[in-house]
Amino acid sequence: MPAIPRSDTKAWKAQVWISFAAAAGLAGTGLAWLPGAEIERAFMLMGYGFCLAMAFALAKHVRDEDAARARRAVVQTPMWAGVVWGGFALAMALTGWGLVQMQINPPYKAFLAVSWLFLMSSAFTLAKTLRDAHEAATHRTHEPSAE
């Protein structure tokens, strides 16, 4: 019998959203005040955006694949798996490379790196929390009524 999805507490949901907002705010602040050429700031902004988008895509892909395995079904093509995993790896690698190559002082570079990793971690947590809420809501709407 499949497990019944449980809803997260309001406190957990608040913590997840506050964490994501803090990570986005810190990353945005670091990028907004980034010293150097405008092209470097644009590259890092695109890198952070690419990483963020791929984190949500990867979280969805992994969750969908897990659900498909539980049903013994195939939902996604191997090509899509390659696109998602490859896109995430490429986004992380290029953003990390850009960060390492930047000619900025080490404490600023460390701030950007930590805020970037905080953003990625909180994005995965937010994606899971949103998916859990969706599954719990879907389960509630499909429960047989007690009449």
Image (cartoon, rainbow, N blue to C red):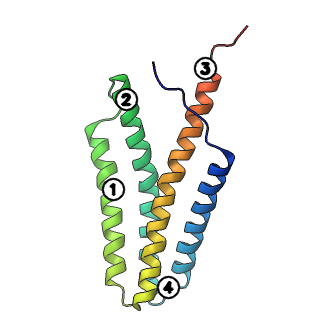
Q: Is residue 139 left or right of residue 96?
A: right
Report the amino acid beneath label 2: Ala
- The tag earlier along the polypeptide, 2 or 1, is 2
The N terminus sits in image quarter: top left
- Which residue is the site of mark 4? 34
Residue 84: give x, y in percent of width and height: 34, 49
Residue depth check, mark 3 versus mark 4: number of the one nearer the observer: 3
The disc placed on residue 142 is 3
Q: Quadrant of residue 25?
A: bottom right
Residue furthest to the top in view is 147
Q: Is residue 99 left or right of residue 14?
A: left
Residue depth check, mark 1 versus mark 3: number of the one nearer the observer: 3
- Dot 4 alpha-carbon crowd within 10 angstroms: few under 14, some 14 to 19, many 20 or more: some
Report the amino acid beneath label 1: Gly
User: Residues under labels 1 and 3: Cα distance?
Assistant: 35 Å
Q: Is residue 18 left or right of residue 65?
A: right
User: Residues under labels 4 and 1: Cα distance?
Assistant: 25 Å
Residue at coordinates 42% horizontally, 62% vertically from top-left? 51
Work out whether 62 lies above or below 143: below
- Which residue is the site of mark 2? 68
The disc placed on residue 87 is 1
